[in-house]
Image (tube, grey):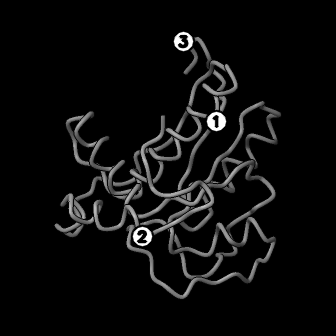
């Protein structure tokens, strides 16, 4: 990113996964004293978000995640909440819709966990726009979508889930 106008990212957005990648990146941001903020995007059936909000390292989630590679029923020891600046809970329908949009825009398939990251990127971009800030955003394409179940790519899942789940950010909807 050296040649970019904003070579130090304003935000790095990571999916919760096991918490290890976000912990490593968050510690590095602090070690180097970068002004970068770390946002962790968690899926709707995962224990990480509740743990971060409540401070309870023993938080659990009884429902299994439907987004491969993101979310856990319990908080993994690799998760370091102290290095996370913001955490958002992403409805499965939003992860799936974001996956589909990004796959179309990039002309290559990405999976649900990358959709979760992309939704988080859109959230961070909206925060920056609302604050009148310029800067760069960074995330990873963490899955190719090869192992996705066929039904995740169907619009019906997005439509069925859209109105059933509420999050701290409201119903699943498109970001401005």
Taking depth in this image into account, of 94 and 31 the one nearest to the observer is 94
- Work out whether 64 lies above or below 34: below
Query: What's the distance in space between the residues labelled 1 and 3, CA to CA?
Result: 18 Å
Distance from disc 2 to disc 1, alpha carbons, whole Å, reads 30 Å
| Residue drawn where x is 39% and y is 51% of the image | 115
Q: Nearer the viewer, mark 2 or mark 1?
A: 2
Work out whether mark 2 precedes mark 3 in sequence or the reverse, and give the earlier one.
Answer: 3
Q: Which residue is drawn at 43% across and 66% down?
A: 69
- Image quadrant holding the N terminus, namely top right
- Please name the residue that numbered disc 1 is placed on: 11
Q: Mark 2 or mark 1: which comes first in sequence? A: 1
* 155 versus 124 height, above or below: below
Q: Which of marks 1 and 3 is in front?
A: 1
Residue 140, image x, y percentages = 46, 44
Q: Do the residues labelled 2 and 1 touch (CB within 8 Å)?
A: no
Q: Name the residue under label 3.
A: 3
- Give me the residue at 37% from left, 61% from top: 162
Picture coordinates of residue 156 (x, y %)? 21, 64
Q: What residue is shown with label 2?
A: 164
Residue at the spot x=22%, y=39% of the render?
104
């Amino acid at each position: 990113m050296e040649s970019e106008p904003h070579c130090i990212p304003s935000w790095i957005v990571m999916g919760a996964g096991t918490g290890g990648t976000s912990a490593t990146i968050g510690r590095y941001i602090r070690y180097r004293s970068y002004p970068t903020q770390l946002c962790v995007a968690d899926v709707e059936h995962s224990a990480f978000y509740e743990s971060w909000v409540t401070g309870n390292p023993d938080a659990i989630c009884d429902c299994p995640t439907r987004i491969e590679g993101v979310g856990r029923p319990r908080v993994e020891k690799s998760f370091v909440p102290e290095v996370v600046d913001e955490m958002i809970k992403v409805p499965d329908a939003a992860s799936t819709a974001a996956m589909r949009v990004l796959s179309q825009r990039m002309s290559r398939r990405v999976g649900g966990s990358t959709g979760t990251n992309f939704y988080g990127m859109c959230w961070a971009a909206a925060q920056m726009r609302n604050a009148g800030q310029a800067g760069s955003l960074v995330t990873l394409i963490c899955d190719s979508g090869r192992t996705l179940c066929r039904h995740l790519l169907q619009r019906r899942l997005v439509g069925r889930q859209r109105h059933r789940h509420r999050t701290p950010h409201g119903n699943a909807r498109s970001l401005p």
